[in-house]
Amino acid sequence: MASIHCLRVVVCSARCICQGGMKCIVGVPWSPEEFIEKARKCLHPKLLTSGLPPELDQVINKNASLCGKSLSMERTATMRKWLGWALECVEAEDKLKNEMSAPRRNILKSKRLCLFERLLGDVGHEDVNIAREMAEGFKLLGSVPKSNFFQKKRRYATMAVSELKRLAPLTRRGIYNSTVSCGDPATRPFTLSRKMNWPRAGSAGPMISRICQRQLH
Protein backbone atom coordinates (compact mmCIF):
# COMPACT_ATOMS: atom_id res chain seq x y z
CA MET A 1 0.00 0.00 0.00
CA ALA A 2 1.07 3.57 -0.54
CA SER A 3 2.64 5.44 2.34
CA ILE A 4 1.25 8.73 3.61
CA HIS A 5 3.46 11.81 3.29
CA CYS A 6 3.28 15.33 4.66
CA LEU A 7 2.54 17.41 1.58
CA ARG A 8 3.30 20.81 3.08
CA VAL A 9 3.39 22.72 6.35
CA VAL A 10 1.74 26.14 6.42
CA VAL A 11 2.45 28.71 9.14
CA CYS A 12 -0.83 30.26 10.28
CA SER A 13 0.41 33.55 11.76
CA ALA A 14 3.17 35.13 13.80
CA ARG A 15 1.10 34.66 16.95
CA CYS A 16 0.69 30.96 16.17
CA ILE A 17 4.45 30.64 15.79
CA CYS A 18 4.97 32.10 19.25
CA GLN A 19 2.43 29.69 20.66
CA GLY A 20 3.91 26.75 18.77
CA GLY A 21 0.92 26.35 16.47
CA MET A 22 1.26 25.30 12.83
CA LYS A 23 -1.12 24.01 10.18
CA CYS A 24 -0.03 20.65 8.77
CA ILE A 25 -1.66 19.22 5.64
CA VAL A 26 -1.28 15.43 5.34
CA GLY A 27 -2.51 13.26 2.51
CA VAL A 28 -1.77 10.62 -0.10
CA PRO A 29 0.31 12.33 -2.82
CA TRP A 30 -1.48 10.65 -5.74
CA SER A 31 -4.76 10.88 -7.53
CA PRO A 32 -7.25 7.99 -7.01
CA GLU A 33 -6.25 6.53 -10.39
CA GLU A 34 -2.53 6.69 -9.55
CA PHE A 35 -3.16 5.15 -6.14
CA ILE A 36 -5.07 2.22 -7.67
CA GLU A 37 -2.32 1.68 -10.25
CA LYS A 38 0.38 1.56 -7.57
CA ALA A 39 -1.73 -0.77 -5.40
CA ARG A 40 -2.27 -3.06 -8.39
CA LYS A 41 1.48 -3.48 -8.85
CA CYS A 42 1.98 -4.52 -5.22
CA LEU A 43 2.14 -8.27 -4.64
CA HIS A 44 0.08 -10.01 -2.01
CA PRO A 45 1.98 -9.98 1.32
CA LYS A 46 1.20 -13.69 1.84
CA LEU A 47 3.20 -14.72 -1.24
CA LEU A 48 6.53 -16.32 -0.31
CA THR A 49 8.33 -14.38 -3.03
CA SER A 50 7.13 -11.00 -1.75
CA GLY A 51 9.83 -10.83 0.91
CA LEU A 52 12.71 -12.10 -1.23
CA PRO A 53 15.42 -9.79 -2.55
CA PRO A 54 15.31 -9.50 -6.36
CA GLU A 55 18.70 -11.23 -6.68
CA LEU A 56 17.57 -14.26 -4.68
CA ASP A 57 14.26 -14.45 -6.55
CA GLN A 58 16.17 -14.42 -9.85
CA VAL A 59 18.48 -17.24 -8.72
CA ILE A 60 15.56 -19.39 -7.54
CA ASN A 61 13.71 -18.95 -10.83
CA LYS A 62 16.83 -19.76 -12.83
CA ASN A 63 17.60 -22.91 -10.83
CA ALA A 64 14.00 -24.05 -11.15
CA SER A 65 13.95 -23.53 -14.91
CA LEU A 66 17.21 -25.35 -15.72
CA CYS A 67 17.51 -29.11 -15.93
CA GLY A 68 19.97 -30.92 -13.70
CA LYS A 69 22.53 -31.40 -16.47
CA SER A 70 22.53 -27.74 -17.51
CA LEU A 71 22.74 -26.59 -13.91
CA SER A 72 25.68 -28.91 -13.20
CA MET A 73 27.54 -27.75 -16.30
CA GLU A 74 27.03 -24.09 -15.41
CA ARG A 75 28.20 -24.61 -11.84
CA THR A 76 31.26 -26.54 -13.00
CA ALA A 77 32.17 -23.78 -15.44
CA THR A 78 31.75 -21.15 -12.73
CA MET A 79 33.94 -23.05 -10.26
CA ARG A 80 36.59 -23.55 -12.95
CA LYS A 81 36.60 -19.80 -13.62
CA TRP A 82 36.86 -18.96 -9.92
CA LEU A 83 39.70 -21.43 -9.36
CA GLY A 84 41.56 -19.84 -12.26
CA TRP A 85 41.09 -16.41 -10.75
CA ALA A 86 42.31 -17.70 -7.37
CA LEU A 87 45.57 -18.87 -8.96
CA GLU A 88 45.99 -15.56 -10.78
CA CYS A 89 45.54 -13.62 -7.53
CA VAL A 90 48.13 -15.54 -5.47
CA GLU A 91 50.93 -13.01 -6.03
CA ALA A 92 48.64 -10.05 -5.38
CA GLU A 93 47.32 -11.71 -2.22
CA ASP A 94 50.85 -12.17 -0.85
CA LYS A 95 51.74 -8.56 -1.63
CA LEU A 96 48.58 -7.29 0.06
CA LYS A 97 49.23 -9.37 3.20
CA ASN A 98 52.83 -8.11 3.42
CA GLU A 99 51.58 -4.50 3.40
CA MET A 100 49.32 -5.12 6.41
CA SER A 101 50.21 -4.58 10.03
CA ALA A 102 50.97 -7.72 12.03
CA PRO A 103 47.59 -7.87 13.86
CA ARG A 104 45.59 -7.42 10.65
CA ARG A 105 47.77 -9.91 8.79
CA ASN A 106 47.18 -12.50 11.51
CA ILE A 107 43.40 -12.01 11.38
CA LEU A 108 43.12 -11.91 7.57
CA LYS A 109 45.79 -14.47 6.70
CA SER A 110 43.22 -16.99 5.40
CA LYS A 111 41.08 -14.41 3.55
CA ARG A 112 41.55 -14.05 -0.21
CA LEU A 113 40.66 -10.39 -0.44
CA CYS A 114 41.93 -9.84 -3.98
CA LEU A 115 39.80 -12.73 -5.21
CA PHE A 116 36.87 -11.40 -3.17
CA GLU A 117 37.23 -7.99 -4.81
CA ARG A 118 37.33 -9.55 -8.27
CA LEU A 119 34.23 -11.65 -7.58
CA LEU A 120 32.31 -8.58 -6.42
CA GLY A 121 33.29 -6.71 -9.56
CA ASP A 122 32.25 -9.65 -11.75
CA VAL A 123 28.70 -9.69 -10.38
CA GLY A 124 28.41 -5.90 -10.44
CA HIS A 125 28.07 -5.43 -6.69
CA GLU A 126 27.55 -1.82 -5.65
CA ASP A 127 29.95 -1.90 -2.70
CA VAL A 128 33.17 -1.96 -4.70
CA ASN A 129 35.40 -0.78 -1.82
CA ILE A 130 34.51 -3.36 0.83
CA ALA A 131 37.51 -5.62 0.11
CA ARG A 132 39.95 -2.70 0.30
CA GLU A 133 38.34 -1.47 3.53
CA MET A 134 38.70 -4.94 5.03
CA ALA A 135 42.40 -4.94 4.14
CA GLU A 136 43.01 -1.47 5.57
CA GLY A 137 40.85 -1.98 8.66
CA PHE A 138 37.56 -0.31 9.49
CA LYS A 139 37.66 2.95 11.41
CA LEU A 140 35.89 2.88 14.75
CA LEU A 141 35.55 6.66 14.86
CA GLY A 142 34.38 9.22 12.34
CA SER A 143 32.11 8.91 9.35
CA VAL A 144 31.05 5.48 8.09
CA PRO A 145 32.16 4.86 4.47
CA LYS A 146 29.37 4.80 1.90
CA SER A 147 28.58 1.30 0.69
CA ASN A 148 26.31 2.31 -2.24
CA PHE A 149 24.34 -0.82 -1.35
CA PHE A 150 22.42 -0.21 1.87
CA GLN A 151 19.83 2.50 2.22
CA LYS A 152 21.39 5.83 3.14
CA LYS A 153 20.60 7.01 6.66
CA ARG A 154 21.92 10.03 8.49
CA ARG A 155 22.86 9.09 12.02
CA TYR A 156 24.60 11.41 14.44
CA ALA A 157 27.10 10.33 17.05
CA THR A 158 25.67 9.79 20.52
CA MET A 159 29.04 10.01 22.26
CA ALA A 160 32.07 12.26 21.98
CA VAL A 161 35.39 10.73 20.93
CA SER A 162 36.99 11.64 24.27
CA GLU A 163 34.18 9.92 26.17
CA LEU A 164 34.45 6.83 23.98
CA LYS A 165 38.19 6.57 24.64
CA ARG A 166 37.59 6.97 28.37
CA LEU A 167 34.97 4.20 28.49
CA ALA A 168 36.72 1.77 26.12
CA PRO A 169 39.02 0.19 28.78
CA LEU A 170 36.08 -0.23 31.16
CA THR A 171 33.93 -1.82 28.47
CA ARG A 172 36.75 -4.13 27.42
CA ARG A 173 37.26 -5.23 31.01
CA GLY A 174 33.53 -5.81 31.45
CA ILE A 175 33.40 -8.06 28.39
CA TYR A 176 36.41 -10.02 29.63
CA ASN A 177 34.95 -10.46 33.11
CA SER A 178 31.72 -11.80 31.66
CA THR A 179 33.59 -14.74 30.10
CA VAL A 180 35.91 -15.83 32.93
CA SER A 181 35.24 -17.90 36.01
CA CYS A 182 33.54 -16.25 38.97
CA GLY A 183 36.29 -17.65 41.22
CA ASP A 184 33.86 -19.12 43.74
CA PRO A 185 35.05 -22.67 44.65
CA ALA A 186 31.48 -23.67 45.53
CA THR A 187 30.02 -22.46 42.24
CA ARG A 188 32.66 -23.71 39.79
CA PRO A 189 32.03 -27.48 40.21
CA PHE A 190 28.29 -26.96 39.78
CA THR A 191 28.80 -24.85 36.64
CA LEU A 192 31.23 -27.44 35.23
CA SER A 193 28.77 -30.27 35.82
CA ARG A 194 26.04 -28.32 34.05
CA LYS A 195 28.32 -27.69 31.09
CA MET A 196 29.27 -31.35 30.85
CA ASN A 197 25.57 -32.20 30.58
CA TRP A 198 25.39 -30.46 27.19
CA PRO A 199 26.60 -33.52 25.16
CA ARG A 200 24.08 -35.76 26.87
CA ALA A 201 21.33 -33.26 26.02
CA GLY A 202 21.91 -33.82 22.32
CA SER A 203 24.57 -31.28 21.31
CA ALA A 204 26.32 -32.02 18.02
CA GLY A 205 30.03 -31.74 17.38
CA PRO A 206 33.22 -32.47 19.36
CA MET A 207 32.98 -31.67 23.06
CA ILE A 208 36.36 -31.50 24.79
CA SER A 209 36.18 -31.55 28.58
CA ARG A 210 39.42 -29.66 29.12
CA ILE A 211 38.01 -26.66 27.22
CA CYS A 212 35.14 -26.40 29.70
CA GLN A 213 37.52 -26.87 32.61
CA ARG A 214 39.89 -24.18 31.32
CA GLN A 215 37.00 -21.69 31.12
CA LEU A 216 36.20 -22.29 34.78
CA HIS A 217 39.73 -21.89 36.17
Image: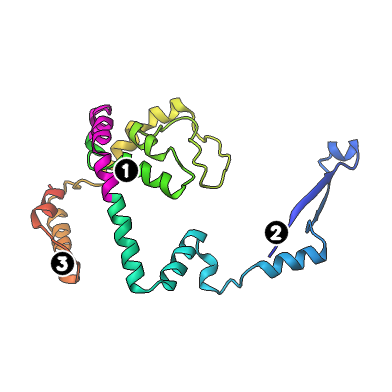
Picture coordinates of residue 86, whole percent (x, y): 27, 45
Q: Residues within 10 Å of mark 1 (few under 14, many from 20)?
A: many
> Which amino acid lies under the numbered mark 2 shown in the image of this protein?
Ser
Cα distance between the residues tagged 3 and 1: 39 Å
> Which amino acid lies under the numbered mark 1 shown in the image of this protein?
Leu
Circle 3: element type: helix
Between circles 3 and 2, the one closer to the viewer is 2
Q: Is residue 6 above or below residue 139?
A: below
Query: What residue did someone put label 1 on?
Result: 115
Picture coordinates of residue 26, whole percent (x, y): 80, 54
Tag 3–tag 1 contact (CB < 8 Å): no
The stretch drawn in magenta includes residue 89: yes
Picture coordinates of residue 83, whole percent (x, y): 26, 50
Residue positioned 25% across, 30% down in the render: 95
Circle 1: element type: helix
Query: What residue did someone put label 2 on?
Result: 3
First-in-chain label (3 vs 1):
1
Of the pair 122 and 199, the residue shown nearer to us: 122
Cα distance between the residues tagged 2 and 1: 42 Å
Q: Main secondary structure of the magenta part?
A: helix
Give the magenta part as a residue range: 83-105
Tag 3–tag 2 contact (CB < 8 Å): no
Of the pair 183 and 49, the residue shown nearer to us: 49
Label number found at residue 65: none
Q: Quadrant of residue 73?
A: bottom left
Query: What residue did someone put label 3 on?
Result: 199
